[in-house]
Every structure is written in C-alpha cells, then in structure tokens.
Amino acid sequence: MLIEFSEKLVYTIFDILAQTKRMRAHNRAPPAASSHCADKTMSMRRLNLKESTYTKETSLVYQALGPDREKTLRQLCSATKLSLERCSQVLYMLARQGCVRKCSSKTSWRTSAAQTYKLEPQSNSRRRRVPLYLEHVRLLHGKVAEQIMFCFFTHGYLTVAEIERLLYRNQKNIQETQAVGGVLERLYHSDFISVADTSQKPSNHVNAEPRLHVSFPECLEKTLWTVDFQNMNRSVCELECVKLVTRTLRDNDARILQYVHRHERASRGSNTSVLASSLSTHFVETDGLSHAEVFQSLESLKMRSYLASAPGDQASEGLHVNTELVTNTSHYQMVYTIIKQRFGETACRLFRLLLKTPQLEQKQISELAMIPLKDCREILGKLLKHEYVRLQEVARTTDHAPSRTNYLWKVHLPSVIVRIQLELQAAYHNLECRLHEELRRENASSCASVFHACVNPRDQSETLSSAKRGPRTSVEKLELSLLRLDKMMIVFSS
C-alpha cells in the first residue's frame, strides 16, 4: 500500500521540485524581476496534492471526515462503502502524510470505547508551502538536505535506511552514508525534523519508546523521522520577517543582518552566535567591504537593537539576531501598510498615534494629529467598525449619560493581528474559489476549441494554437495574489 501510494504521489512531488528549480533559475536574475518570476512559477494548481495525487478512495475518506468532524473507523466504512481493512489502510496513509490525527476515545453507556479520527486543519497550508520549505532548506543546508526533505514530504515517516534507499537506489558507498547521517544531524539540530509520534496511527513499524529529547547519535538507526512543521513554519516566518525589516535598512546593514540570521538558523543547537571577527572577514573577502564599513554597519544594527551580543559571548563578541524585535517590527510594518491601503494615510497616522499613546479622547486625537474634528470622527468610526481600534466608556455618574461620560480610544495590537489573520483567510478562500472557477472556464473553452478543430479540420492549426496560447492574464494574477497572501499569512503566523 505504501509503495502504491508513493508512486501516485511522486509525480506531483517531482513537478513541485521542478518548480523549485525554475525558482532558483529565476532567483539568479536581477532583483526587480526575480520575485515576480518566482511567484509566477509556483503554480497553485500544482500544489494541491490532496486532489491530484490521492486515490479516489482516499478522497472519499477525506470528504467523509470533513472539517470539524470526528468519526470512528466503522462510521467511515459505512459512509464511504469501503471495507474495514481498506479504510484502515487509507487512514494509515493520511496519518503518515499528516492529514489525519487521532482524537481521544469516546465512550457512552450504550457503546464501548471507540477511537475517533479528525482532519488536521493545517495540512492544506503545509502542502501548499512545500516549494517554499524546500527553497528554505536548500538555502540553509544545501542540495542534499533539500533532497532528504523532499523524501519526507513524499513519504511521511522514514528511517535512515529508507532515506538512503530512496536517494541512492542501493548504489551508495560509505561516504554517501556518512553524508546522509551528517545532513540529518544538521536538520535535527535546526529543528526541521524530529522523532515521529507514531501513537497517532496503528502500525507494526513504530517507535517502541520514542525518546524525543536525546542526542542525535543515540536514536539514529531504527528511529522513524518526520518533518517538524511547527519549527519549519517558525523558521520560514523568521526569514520573511527579516526580509521585511531589511527593506528599510541600507544595503550593507541588510546583507549583514541576513547573513547573521542565516548562519544562526543553519547552526541552531551547536553554535547559535556569529563571531564579529569571522563576519568581518567574510564580507571583506566576498563583498569587498572594508573592516571599518563592516563594524559601522554592526554598530548601526546594534543601535537599532536588531543585533545583540550572545549571552556568555561578550569576550568573543558573539552576535545573534533579536528575533522578537524583528518579528514585532515586521508586524507593525504590515499592519501600517494594510491600514494605509484600506483607509488612507490619515487613518494610518491616527492608528500609530493611538498605538503609541492610548486612552485619548477624540478632541485630543484631533489636536495631536492636526486634522479637523469632523474628519477625525469619521476615520475613527471606520476603524472602530472594522475592529482596528477600541472605545472605552468612563462614566462620571451612575446614569451613564453621554454628556457626563468620557470616551477613550485605544489600540489593542494582538486583537488587530487576529482580525487581519481572519481577513486574510477569508480573502484567500475567495481567491481560491475564483481561481478554480477560472480554471474550469478555461478547460471548458479549450475543450470546445479542440472539438471545433476536429469538426473543421481546415482551420485546425489556428484553433489549436489559439487554444494553446489562451488568455492567461486572470489566472496568473489570481495565482500571484494567492502566493502573496500566503506569504502575509506566514508573517502573521508567529
């Protein structure tokens, strides 16, 4: 069953890997066009693994579970009309790919204890971000690490022997075996892989006593490994936040901050700081900067608190990225941009004023922001309607009369971020539905063109060429918008 499922899954995974290779080729282009080309190459139509690679029986089980439903194995069998053995095999595959998880057993006075199953809500977003994960791993650990993570995304749980068999097809030597072990150790210390929790599924091939917090060589041989999606998302989120912050920095400062973050993520667990002397030597040799320019950029980043001295490394001048400050700064930038685009620059100014100085009355806000009272009232009403600001009533008397009540305005940033997350999810769902509809229309028009060419063979070449070209503007715009929304959702996922 595992081999049959993997053969069906590998075609789309290889398609994803081809997209990542095209992304790398475009990334070597000038910066102005690289991001646009990389976004366009990651087609959302090819990332939906659940629909394109899973078997029909798996789709039936997936639909039977549905969102926010818990069902037992016998309930799934009756809903899908599958045998008990076949349904359990499908659940095994879905659990291996991280799409289904076990829930607590339910008991009642009529029935005995029964194990229930539920869909993993984050599985779709994980599959959608596979090319982004592969690019991130390649950036930090190289091509072999990318191939190993590719095997994990394809097969789910794997041992070291299974990884070597998939990579080298029984044609490996001792050096390649040691290379796989070294890369796995780096991935383990970077928190990209972890010991698989096989208690989520019934299987004979399980970890008897999974020791999740032991050193790597002690649990290497017969341990099942899997992707740690939580830490992977955190790492990708940090990288996107660093990219947002570096847009406001000078070129030298931006390159140094990205280098320190990349080195810190690649060596997480062994050496979490970067020596200032080695950093200076690297940029002098590779970028042609002088030692004075490097130390000037380091001082500038330290003054902004983006870089800090590692604890216990003051003597050796170890540096690390202030991840919390970088994340908060990127959140501020994204929130300001969203408010400015939706409500205007004046609304963004009021929001920033309330964020820095909360609990202000409307007249005070108007005076501090230097805008008319009428315009201030209208803008605050719009922000309150969309839950970007809050209004607090402080009554001076018990009757709560408006003339004897103070109305104070403030901003609660965590609730604003939650609100933006919900809006992004709703926008993503609407764009995805629109994309599916556009693709349906495009497929229908292409089929009609082919049928017309078969009926009228005289203008067959013109009809087929026009159908092949086809207007792709709306589809490409929707795909690009989905990719940008997904990156914004990654930033706010922290």
Image: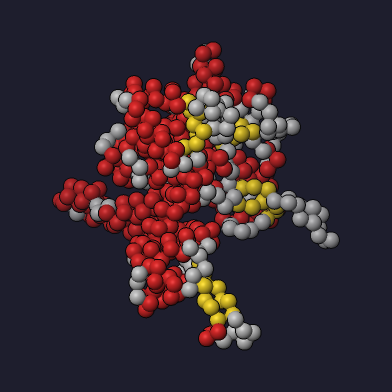
Q: Residue furthest top?
A: 174
The residue at the far left in this view is 458
Q: Residue at x 18, y 47 (%)?
A: 461
Task: For residue 464, say whether it is visible.
Answer: no
In-front residue for pair 211/474: 211
Q: Answer with the quarter of the image where residue 435 lies.
A: bottom left
Q: Quarter of the image for the N terminus: give it.
A: top right
Q: Position of residue 290 (x, y in %)?
A: 32, 25
Q: How is the image coloured?
A: secondary structure
Q: Residue drawn 48% across and 63% down?
A: 357
Question: Is 358 or 104 nearer to us in this picture?
Answer: 358
Residue shown at 43% from the left, 70% from the top: 365
Q: Position of residue 379 (x, y in %)?
A: 39, 72
Q: For this rendering, which residue is in front, 152 or 215? A: 215
Relative to 370, residue 87 above or below:
above
Answer above or below: position of 2 versus 99: above
Q: Quadrant of residue 195?
A: top right
Residue at screen point 63% across, 58% down: 69
Q: Nearer the viewer, residue 272 or 483?
A: 272
Q: In the rendered image of this protein, does residue 10 appear above or below residue 164?
A: below
User: Could one spot residue 396 in this view of the protein?
Assistant: yes
Q: Where does residue 353 sit, x and y in percent of width and height? A: 43, 63
Tell me how many marks there are. Answer: 0
